Amino acid sequence: MYSDSLNTVPHLTTVLRGPLQHLESHLLQNQAEIEKWFRQQWHIAPAPFYTSVDLRNAGFKLAPVDTNLFPGGFNNLNPAFLPLCIQAVQSAIERINISTTRILIISENHTRNLFYFESILTLRDILQQAGVEVRIGSMQPNLKAPQEIMLPSGYSITLEPLIRIDNYVSVKDFMPCIILLNNDLSDGCPPILENIQQLIMPPLHLGWYTRLKSKHFTHYRQVAQEFSQQLNVDPWLIEPLFKNCGEIDFMKRSGEDCLADNVTALLHDIQKKYTQYQVPYKPFVIIKADSGTYGMGIMTIHDPEEIYHLNRKQRTRMAATKAGQKNTKVIIQEGVYTFETLGEAVAEPVVYMIDHFVVGGFYRVHTERGINENLNAPGMHFEPLAFVDSCITPNQDMEPDACPNRFYAYGVIARLALLAAARELQE
Amino acid sequence: MYSDSLNTVPHLTTVLRGPLQHLESHLLQNQAEIEKWFRQQWHIAPAPFYTSVDLRNAGFKLAPVDTNLFPGGFNNLNPAFLPLCIQAVQSAIERINISTTRILIISENHTRNLFYFESILTLRDILQQAGVEVRIGSMQPNLKAPQEIMLPSGYSITLEPLIRIDNYVSVKDFMPCIILLNNDLSDGCPPILENIQQLIMPPLHLGWYTRLKSKHFTHYRQVAQEFSQQLNVDPWLIEPLFKNCGEIDFMKRSGEDCLADNVTALLHDIQKKYTQYQVPYKPFVIIKADSGTYGMGIMTIHDPEEIYHLNRKQRTRMAATKAGQKNTKVIIQEGVYTFETLGEAVAEPVVYMIDHFVVGGFYRVHTERGINENLNAPGMHFEPLAFVDSCITPNQDMEPDACPNRFYAYGVIARLALLAAARELQE
């Protein structure tokens, strides 16, 4: 069973908790209406196959800051909740195609991150236990034969080169019914996957070669509005404000004025809200690549002047994203403080969903990062801390901020981001 | 989290395990095909809302002996798997009616069994956590106002009298979308529930006033046949043979010859199978009321002669069932030894399902009963021992009879009984 050391839950250390407690009480009181609303929403816009959502809990607001449609990190989930993942996969497959028996996972190309492949191993096991045959394909250019990768856990997985014959993609002796992408397509749309007969989940157009964060958050704004209206709360409590700029060239320093102006306007909007709720902190914004991932090309800004004084290293970092693609579009997002801490370390919840079911999550716990910094950054060390709770066991008899209820709130807000992604999917 | 003492799993203490290991290996090897088959079956015949199935594991065979469509005992499930129950309820409601917000549970009338009401409490919590408003109605004749019942757990529940206005059933200030029957209707079909507009689950015609075990096992025989053919195993490994008689009057001793003849024939059939599989035990049969429940009107018979020598007490017990109804129909079922033991005690697995999802189970552990007796008997003391496993995490890397795999086999066989019930439902 589960070790006691994992019973830990980060403390929420902030002087200002009023607005969020108000929201949490509302979520609890209206649980039946909320769940009914979600049921209707999934009926209109079915959820992507799997999604993870990064949340930030400032005590006075709780908002998603990133929605990942190709989640890694399954190995960080609480093993006690893997049955939930299995059941959710079974539901998903029933909805998608009851005849499914074989799924091919397509992994990322970077083969040196063994923790990533631990996640692929966990994902494979979940699918297998749900009663599907699974193999793992790779688009790594130099992969000509199956490659076994030994993992820190002592297990191994085998990556197999893809085979394209006519309009079908397979690996040797295994013709999948469904292609499950776990590769975010930062490098572009791979020709080998174009125009194939099999179902690809998520669809290619949700890969980072074309997806835009600003589009996701435009949908999220709409979702947050609809949800807040129904609950009669201020949408700002669950939404990060944002703006986006046209073309920017960080190296050539073109587009700086537009960026600085937007930062000014956004900081102003945040300050207005901080004043309204008597938040005693300094507003900040996060600038990120609009189509980036992996926390590259991300910076924290407190003052528009900083835009004009970036050093060469900062510019270079902003100009490139994961696969060395040039970053010319950015999103300027309201920075949401994270006031959850474990000892000295800052913690950020990540919620996992399969289909529209919340199946758990974990905290990213950083010892070297501040409460106003992005915690999903390359090279930054974080410790995963599996949720002790499934996020689906709210308890009306307990305080709104008691553990099962705080996790329930995480599950609700994460599902709002999921709904935004479902609407992207439908476009 | 979960205490270590519950990690216990009964030992399977029998010399003969070959046939079952063969079956278990088959189940594991064909898991993807089995799950696909189930998916197609639920598409054709949707599962009842909730079901528990009593299994008997003889080592050489594994078979359901009773299928309960109004399950109690939710309080005996492993609390670690309640999230699985919650998720399954959410899936069920989505399938049944996405607009559902209020469910009225109708409980049994016997108000002295507090453990029964602990189960109702757990069931209510599961539904609430799935995001539905829940109240508990009772058809107890003398209930005129809400009655609070204090429970051993320290919680309480409130039973409310039903209100019938036109074609709607409600309790005060609460108009349910769905009526969830947890009353097995042994007393007959209650007029207050007839011809109402709301959905009743399970439907009235599955109450014991009309349901017949022999009908259920006729469906089960067909299901076992279809499943065994696909898996290429002997259906006897998963099916209790049975026969049924016409009218019997235990008090007037009419119908005895028919009963004795059927017992003779059934014992003969079992002996043939025992010989085929070199089973070194003595065959026996169980005679039960065809429409009974609660383990009343049940006896173990090793020799047809016993039928003619029942004493008055045995006759009286067989003649009446739960609600004092007269028992004139019996089913004669192959007795399946239970070779699972915990210390000196005999253990019998009970598997719980919500919709078509296996959500856990527990062992009935009896210290005072034999390996060839019915373990669900009135007044008999049993200790529930929650499953340490969810029944949905089979592991191909482990032995076919390793814990997660034994539990997976339980989940498969229980779902076959569930499928038989789904076909009863459809009739």
Image (tube, coloured by chain):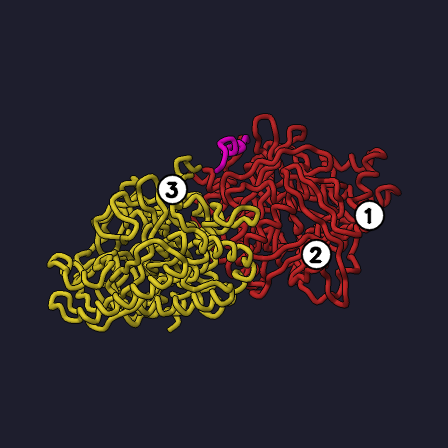
Chain colours: A yellow, B red
Q: Is residue A74 left or right of residue B278?
A: left
Residue A64 placement, left or right of B206: left
Q: Is residue B5 magenta?
A: yes
Q: Quadrant of the C terminus of chain B?
A: bottom right
Q: Which mark is residue B397?
A: 3
Please tell me the numbered disc located at residue B325. Answer: 1
Mark 1 element type: loop
Q: Is residue B288 left or right of residue A401?
A: right
Residue B208 location in percent, x, y? 74, 52
The part of the chain drawn in magenta is B1-14
Q: Do circles 3 and 2 both sit on a common chain?
A: yes
Give yes or no for contact between labels 1 and 3 (Cβ–Cβ under 8 Å).
Answer: no
Q: Residues within 10 Å of mark 1 (few under 14, many from 20)?
A: some
**Separation of marks 1 and 3 at Cα, in angstroms:** 51 Å
Front residue of B87 and A350? A350
Pick the front one: B81 or A222: A222
